[in-house]
Amino acid sequence: AYKAEGQKTYMCTGRPGWLTMSLRIGKYKKTLKNITINLMDILDVDTERQVVRVEPLVSMGQLTAHLNSIGWTIPVVPELDDLTVGGLLMGTGIESSSHIYGLFQHICVACELVLADGSHVRCTPEENSDLFYAVPWSCGTLGFLVAAEIKMIPSKNYVKLHYEPVRGLKTICKRFAEESEKKENHFVEGIVYSLEEAVIMTGVLTNEAEQEKVNRIGMYYKPWFFKHVENYLKANTTGTEYIPARDYYHRHTRGIFWELQDIIPFGNHPIFRCLFGWMVPPKISLLKLTQGETMRKLYEQHHVIQDMMIPMKSLEQCIQTFHSVIKVYPLWLCPFILPHNPGMVHPKGDEEELYVDVGAYGMPQTKHFEAMASTRQLEKFVRNVHGFQ
């Protein structure tokens, strides 16, 4: 049908903008030829090759539910349930295990695309390698993704998670870098609650647990994860818990990191959690679908959702810049190793380098905040330190 119409416009996926996890609603879909691609199945689990073959609309919640039930998981599980393989591969994805495995794109061993001429192409690091390394961060501009092969690793029952409150910006950055360099830590994550206060979490996968220390944080009546973590900061004490593996992988889903506190300010109250906690979080797609134009513009002008990926050595300077330009807290810190591979994103030098994703989600507290100007200011800083957005 597209050829019969004379191929007068470019093609794009027919998935509505409100269905995506991004707050941006792409207006380009209104003028391009929309191609509906409802590919949302797990196709094959190859335990010999330790690879799972999936279609692009398979979500992280769907994938971990299936793999965990048969004793497997993927090395990098981005936290939110509704994130899809296609978005994570053609955009980017990260998790607290990325200091070992890299970004989501680095656990992909093959992908299949339908190109503009209608041809079906399989690409790997050895076969059609130029296309393989160009797919990440391409945002769907090279073709339609129809399948991907993702690495798997054996799963375990629990994550033994250690919480360490840290004070003083220099100390926070030093401790975070030290823990990120330790490969014996299966997971490393930081939540910065102010310019001088943070909690650094390190975890290891295990099958054994001290039952009195098991915390099923995925239960609907439990506090939001970032609020639970903050208790260690307020008490100024370290602690260790055993969290069921799937609860850990999706620990930020119920609070949408900390975005839900702006949507439902009383959502973390014990009474609300016990009575209505099973109803949250609301689907981001539903919020976008029912959001009026005025609310959307207010959100764009007075809300920040930014992930900046910068070299670990620039972390202290980055937090100071975020504080002076937008002053949004908490900040999410997630380390990742960036290999020197071909493609759009790689370190400045010739060797792999440790980077950190600094995530700012919330209402800016600086009086001089202007959405466009302030974002450009952050982007300039990121470019200057050879980072990525």
Image: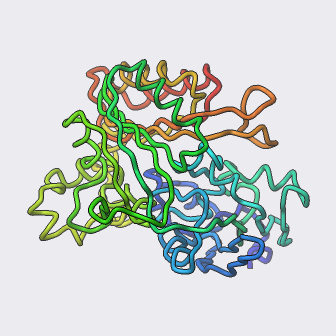
Indicate left or right for 366 with 170 as reference.
left
**Quarter of the image that includes the C terminus:** top right
Asked whether the viewer can see residue 156, the reply is: yes
**73 versus 300 height, above or below:** below
For image coordinates 48% across by 31% down, the residue present is 176
For image coordinates 57% across by 30% down, the residue present is 310
Extreme right residue here?
A: 127
**Quarter of the image that includes the N terminus:** bottom right
Image colouring: rainbow
Q: Position of residue 128 (x, y in %)?
A: 89, 58
Q: Where is residue 286 in the image (x, y as percent from the top left)?
A: 35, 66
**193 versus 38 height, above or below:** above
Toward the viewer: 289 or 150? 150
Toward the viewer: 151 or 81? 151
Indicate left or right for 308 with 348 as reference.
left
Indicate left or right for 277 with 346 as reference.
left
Extreme left residue here?
A: 271
**92 versus 176 height, above or below:** below
For image coordinates 26% across by 28% down, the residue present is 365
Q: Position of residue 359 (x, y in %)?
A: 44, 39
Asked whether the viewer can see residue 290, the reply is: no
Task: Tally the numbered discs.
Answer: 0
- Residue 267 falls in which quadrant of the image? bottom left
Q: Where is residue 122 in the image (x, y as percent from the top left)?
A: 84, 68
Toward the viewer: 137 or 374? 137
For image coordinates 41% across by 43% down, the residue present is 201
Toward the viewer: 338 or 267? 338
